[in-house]
């Protein structure tokens, strides 16, 4: 099974086929070379019919490179491996044996018994890796020491900024570069408010539905449309194996919520969770290569009563599991109590914290309440602890928030968490539109990203209703790429507007194929155009079906420009001439009205 | 053909069928009675499984009332006719004969020759009506005289405010109540920033595609999903007849751009347009009952050169037609020159001005430029003239605007146009997502409405690509209802949050049917839920397919509330008790970290 066959959207299939009559149009995968061999930053190069080209950020990984043979059974090439090994501060070790319960299998079965990572993913035998004793192996530690890693150089090229800017932002804790030493397949990317706004797509099976193959396919599909990271939120069977396959095939950082798997191991009984089971799960996932982990350590015992009079209580799965545990034992959260120890584990693999907002509001009524902000203050405290251990850290944010309460969220988060990257779910700006929550939340996402959120967690049309399928994943990603790019524009991110300008030029000049190829979703744009004007000549027609040829404003604008000279000066001179004739003829002009 | 059969979405079909086991759930059309017979304000009454009910604003007209037989050949009952006649300030008259060219037919044909309105719509013979000589018959004139008309009372009930507030806002020019005396079928509604944010849906055939039946169906379909007004932007054949059928069947105000039809009459040659042809077209449409008209009188000769160096020139059809005319003749716009005369015509029928922004930006690059704001200042001048003639007036706004430039638009418009209602198209916050411009624009729409825009013109997924079909119309309307409601919430509109609260209560209590029935789009919400959990018991299940039964945060929250007492005080007391035991046992709690 080659990934390319089944999963490539039409527009990216055989891009070389789009070269015709000696003119290369469409787009192809290209690379920008860095300062060392093997440091090649992928870009999407769009070739326009007017001979120009536009370079766009590309998250799709090797799958869109016709020169690379990909095979999900073998996984992607470990492009960062040499960089990691060359640093000499990590070591391979035997690792934790994989147990049946890691995959949710309780009793001895043909699949049961101890296994190692090779058995889970036979395609590429490997041992897990971790920092040597006494070595700080996180990008944060390197940045603080003034080192510019290959990963930092990679993202500097990708973001079109200097490597020093990347290093500074990471060192200051204002940006994270999630890059577990056990996920060498990932193409480095950065999350921080000085960089392009990023989008995360959630995938994951549940006890009710979905399979390993589907999840791997959702991951490649999501990155194809622009997902910068993917979270695997699986909760059903085969969690461990699904995650291994996703990681070995993922060109983007993978995030998880280890608590979900830990709960599976105690058969869903929150009160049976222990620090030991949780810690073991974190190590299990860190060895696999999970790049960032959501940890709900801010849900403290004392905050649970603050949610009692809420409209929708606790809506975060992780938050509610921890609240249930705290109440069942009448004890402080084991995540909060063992947070320093957890930092040491994450630091050994360079796993990035995503400090979860377990008490985020689940309805408009609950936005910005005491419970939410109490937890945020604790996240600020945990952020400082994590930094002390050189663990890269971002902070998760809501949720359901009406527009007028959004800014308070990002402002408070930035203040309390010392500008650590904010990573928000939407927020959803109203509760009344299930089946359209990609839109209710896309609105809030664009706004909060403009104001400083660094990464947006997508919401699909199935939010609140069911598990997203392939189409929902695409819709969610595209919606959030829109929100992210709208924010990049509003922030005045250097170069962001070039993309809009190129597309608008193509639109004004009726270069339909260029419009399609520059679109966030070329396939759907082309399909919609062809619905009413399917014939090939319509692709070069100087009108479209909205107005027909007689009414086309773009065409009239072009006629005006052509007939009256191209530039403003020329038009003004032509008009001035006519105006003199006009005045000489004594024609009355409508007199301005007195106030 | 009864409209109900073909066009009713599943959720509204035979709502009485949803009554079962003596318990009425689902929703039905209800009416709130006013102070006089026949003044009945429609509402959508949603009946919940917990015995409560929620009252929602309803734009769907008599089509959703099972007690009313509708027939598109007869048209809707003229509910405002008695009110209009009773005022005694209008008169019927012979009216302008309908000519073949009104329908785009040039030569004598079996359908050619003079006709009257009866021939165009045989279902309800009528004569056009206009204000008597010397009478000011607009809602603005009545409001200024201190009169509260039945129309004002109707919208006061609809908006849940006092009639005096409605009168004041109209008298001050801060709101309009579009209500042509020749469109007595319409249910009064109000557009102004103190009221609920409204949504307009555009329909209309073009020379390339579409038919009369389709347009009438699109209108009823759009209002079914929440469109507050509909603009008929037809440009092809049968413009006059299509508009007549749309008007006779429309429960919402209908807007047009008369310039489109005028241009058809001169075979698409802008330079052949004259004031006489335009004026005749305005009278033709006013007699039919058009409630508001977009007039691009702000596109002055001197502003055309300001667009020469733009990325996308002039993108408004009306704007480009007028620019072409001005340049072809090297004369000031005839709309600007004859604006006072136009005011007199509109005043006679109570047609509301929608002063068009012919120079709105069509790309991110062109936002907030000199051309756009020069025209806006002229619109401010024209607004004052219109008010002098007692013509209700709103102002149209952009277009393509990045987020950080949106607020300047509404602030300037409110200042320059003395708080006249702003009516904006989006704005689109990026150019790069053709096929998703309902979303790029929904983001901008929500923001600008929060800041004061009174009505939002929807954008469908087909924007820039083709004519919207039935699904596109629905998607556009729903997206814009989301933007409008998100803005109502952010503005703190009284009662707006009750809807969100009711839905969130249902969500927290796993009342799935109530969630569906309260949703903006019950059909799709139900369909999405059923995709993964189709069985009937899942409608009462205390979990859904996202997390499965073990992980449901809502369920855990409920368990917490149940086990530990319902209120915050009870939980705190329970916890305090445990806490005492806990402290007595000497358990260590994680110590707060010093800064």
Image (cartoon, coloured by chain):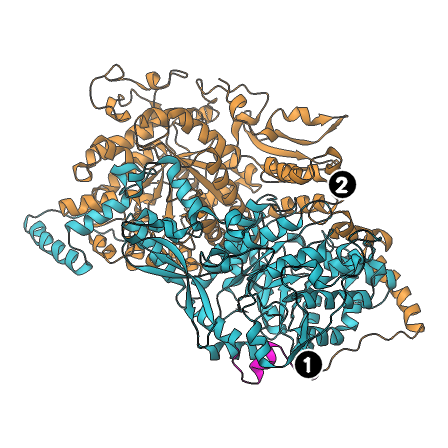
Chain colours: A orange, B cyan
Pinpoint residue A263: horizontal percent, then vertical percent.
Answer: 24, 35
The residue pinned by badge 1 equals B132
Q: Callout 2: 10 Å neighbours few (<14), some, many (20+)?
A: few
On the rendered structure, is A202 left or right of B565?
right
On the rendered structure, is A363 left or right of B203?
left
All told, the count of numbered labels is 2
Under circle 1, the secondary element is loop
Pinpoint residue A244: horizontal percent, then vertical percent.
Answer: 37, 25
For the stretch drawn in magenta, what is the main secondary structure? loop
Q: Which region shows up in magenta?
A: B133-149
The residue pinned by badge 2 equals A541
From the viewer's side, name the closer residue of B532 and B547: B532
Q: CA distance from mark 2 to mark 1?
A: 50 Å
At horizontal 14% and vertical 44% (from top left) the residue drawn is A329
Q: Disc 1 sits on a residue from what chain?
A: B
The relative height of residue A167 versus residue B182 in the rendered view (above or below) is: above
Pinpoint residue B546: horizontal percent, then vertical percent.
Answer: 34, 38
From the viewer's side, name the closer residue of A82 and B288: B288
Q: Disc 2 sits on a residue from what chain?
A: A
**Res B172 seen here:** no
């Amino acid at each position: 099974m080659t990934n390319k066959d089944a999963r490539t959207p039409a527009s990216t299939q055989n891009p070389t086929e789009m070269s015709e009559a000696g003119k290369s149009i469409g787009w192809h995968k290209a690379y920008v070379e860095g300062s060392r061999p093997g440091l090649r930053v992928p870009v999407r190069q769009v070739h326009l019919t007017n001979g120009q080209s536009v370079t766009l950020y590309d998250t799709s990984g090797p799958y869109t490179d016709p020169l690379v043979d990909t095979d999900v059974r073998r996984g992607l090439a470990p492009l960062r491996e040499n960089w990691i090994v060359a640093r000499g501060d990590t070591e391979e070790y035997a690792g934790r044996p994989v147990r049946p319960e890691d995959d949710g299998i309780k009793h001895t079965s043909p699949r049961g018994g101890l296994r190692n990572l090779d058995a889970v993913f036979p395609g590429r035998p490997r041992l897990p890796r971790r920092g040597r004793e006494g070595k700080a192996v996180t990008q944060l530690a390197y940045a603080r020491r003034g080192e510019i890693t290959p990963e930092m150089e990679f993202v500097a090229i990708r973001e079109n900024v200097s490597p020093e800017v990347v290093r500074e932002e990471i060192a200051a804790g204002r940006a994270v570069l999630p890059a577990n030493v056990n996920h060498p397949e990932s193409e480095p990317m950065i999350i921080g408010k000085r960089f392009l706004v990023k989008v995360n797509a959630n995938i994951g099976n549940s006890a009710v539905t979905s399979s390993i193959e589907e999840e791997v396919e959702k991951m490649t599909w999501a990155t194809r449309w622009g997902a910068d990271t993917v979270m695997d939120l699986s909760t059903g069977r085969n969690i461990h194996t699904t995650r291994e396959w996703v990681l070995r095939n993922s060109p983007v950082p993978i995030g998880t919520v280890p608590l979900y798997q830990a709960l599976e191991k105690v058969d869903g009984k929150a009160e049976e969770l222990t620090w030991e089971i949780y810690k073991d799960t974190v190590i299990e996932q860190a060895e696999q290569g999970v790049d960032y982990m959501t940890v709900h350590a801010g849900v403290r015992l004392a905050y649970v009563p603050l949610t009692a009079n809420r409209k929708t209580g606790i809506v975060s799965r992780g938050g509610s599991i921890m609240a249930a545990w705290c109440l069942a034992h009448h004890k402080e959260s084991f995540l909060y109590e063992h947070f320093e120890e957890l930092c040491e584990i994450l630091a050994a693999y360079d796993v990035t914290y995503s400090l979860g907002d377990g008490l985020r509001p689940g309805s408009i009524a609950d936005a910005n309440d005491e419970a939410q902000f109490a937890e945020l203050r604790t996240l600020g405290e945990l952020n400082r602890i994590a930094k002390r251990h050189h663990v890269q850290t971002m902070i998760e944010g809501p949720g359901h928030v009406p527009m007028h309460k959004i800014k308070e969220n990002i402002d408070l988060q930035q203040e309390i968490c010392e500008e650590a990257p904010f990573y928000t779910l939407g927020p959803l700006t109203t509760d009344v539109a299930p089946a359209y929550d990609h839109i209710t939340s896309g609105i809030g996402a664009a706004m909060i990203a403009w104001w400083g959120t660094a990464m947006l967690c997508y919401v699909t049309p199935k939010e609140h209703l069911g598990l997203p399928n392939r189409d929902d994943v695409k819709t969610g990603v595209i919606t959030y790429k829109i929100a992210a790019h709208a924010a990049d524009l509003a922030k005045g991110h250097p170069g962001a507007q070039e993309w809009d300008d190129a597309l608008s030029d193509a639109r004004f000049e009726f270069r339909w194929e260029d419009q399609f190829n520059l679109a966030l979703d070329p396939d759907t744009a082309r399909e919609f155009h062809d619905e009413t004007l399917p014939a090939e000549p319509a692709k070069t027609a100087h009108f479209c079906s909205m107005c027909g040829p007689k009414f086309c404003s773009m065409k009239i604008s072009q006629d005006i420009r052509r007939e009256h000279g191209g530039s403003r000066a020329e038009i003004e001179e032509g008009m001035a001439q006519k105006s003199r004739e006009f005045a000489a003829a004594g024609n009355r002009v409508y007199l301005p009205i007195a106030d």
